Amino acid sequence: MRPEISYVRGGQSERFILNPGDHVSITDIEGGQSCDVRVDGAGDPLGLNGVNRVLTGGVPGSEISLTVAADCKCEIIAAGGPMMPDEQTPPTDLRVEIARAGEARPPLALLARPKQEILVQAATAQAYEVKQGDYIQILDVDGQQCSDFLAFDAEALAQGEVFGLDSTTTRSLNGNVYPGPGLYAKFFDERMQGLVEVVRDTCGRHDTFGLACFAKSYEDAGYPGHANCTDNFNEVLNPYGIAARKGWPAINFFYNTQLAANGAIVPDESWSRPGDYVLMRALKDLVCATSSCADDIGVTNAYEPTDILVRVHDGA
């Protein structure tokens, strides 16, 4: 199971509950940032021997690792100090990674006995059919794994027409970056017809602005031939008569994309935890495709693609 990853923002602090055998790593990302640790608990559960400042502001990537000996509460502080007008020494972020001792993968939320259960292995994709009224549950098994989602009107496909989820239409009709449970919950196609409706979302941070990862993005980064979601989608959608594309405008669940004040689209590590899921209701008979994003060269999937689980539940 993946470790828990958190960030202590410069000049701020975060508190953590720790248990015996947990392993804590603290990294000075940019360098020059000190780190203070305060512990509530009997004895010396982190083996600090009375030392509170565990990082003293060294080079970028400086790290300390601590093993927890007893239950405790720990506060990690990215403290700032005085800065003269001619200095450039603002407080910066610390990265905290906690590997929990003996923690098994949490059980995945079982809402009902599924009609279909589809394991989408890391860096692959699967296609499947869903009936109107059925529920589609897309689960992040290990956490911090993005999953692109496509859905097409099955009746239109049978007539040789391809109408799939359209992010621009959806944003325009809803007035937000992506649908969520409530009044503005539907994803639409380019005909402005609803295809799926979001019923529950335990993560709350996704992406509808970019394409599913595609071959050119890896080629430009120096990784020709790298597995990618677009090629994986092309392969599994071919039996349904859907033509291949160079890039699929998918809904990327669990992808942590933010719009910066200057208009830049900024990706960051996913917020999804093990077992987080998005639950949708099919508004038409659909042909769907789900990927486990193949990106292991960027922060998107915490540099290690893992599995996605799809469960289709009967509308009843």
Image (cartoon, rainbow, N blue to C red):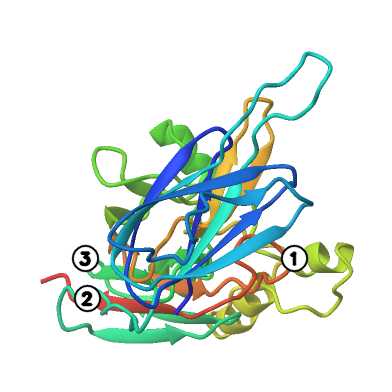
Report helix, strand or loop for mark 2. Answer: strand
- Cα gap from disc 3 to disc 2, whole angstroms: 9 Å
- Label 2 or label 1, whichever lies nearer to me, is 2
Pinpoint residue 85: horizontal percent, then vertical percent: 78, 13
Tell me the number on the disc at residue 246.
Answer: 1
- Cα gap from disc 2 to disc 1, whole angstroms: 32 Å
Identified by mark 1, the residue type is: Lys
Q: Name the foreground residue: 65 vs 123.
A: 65
Residue that appears at 39% across and 35% down: 174
Residue labelled with disc 2: 313
Rendered view: 63 above or below 226: above
Rendered view: 91 above or below 167: above
- Cα gap from disc 1 to disc 3, whole angstroms: 32 Å
Residue 267, visible in the rendered structure: yes
Comes first in the chain, label 1 or label 3: 3
Answer with left or right where residue 103 lies relative to residue 225: left
Identified by mark 3, the residue type is: Gly
Residue that appears at 57% across and 83% down: 236
Q: Name the foreground residue: 150 vs 207.
A: 207
- Label 3 or label 2, whichever lies nearer to me, is 2
Tell me the number on the disc at residue 207.
Answer: none
Pinpoint residue 303: horizontal percent, then vertical percent: 65, 70
| Numbered label tally | 3
Identified by mark 2, the residue type is: His
Comes first in the chain, label 3 or label 2: 3
Residue labelled with disc 3: 133
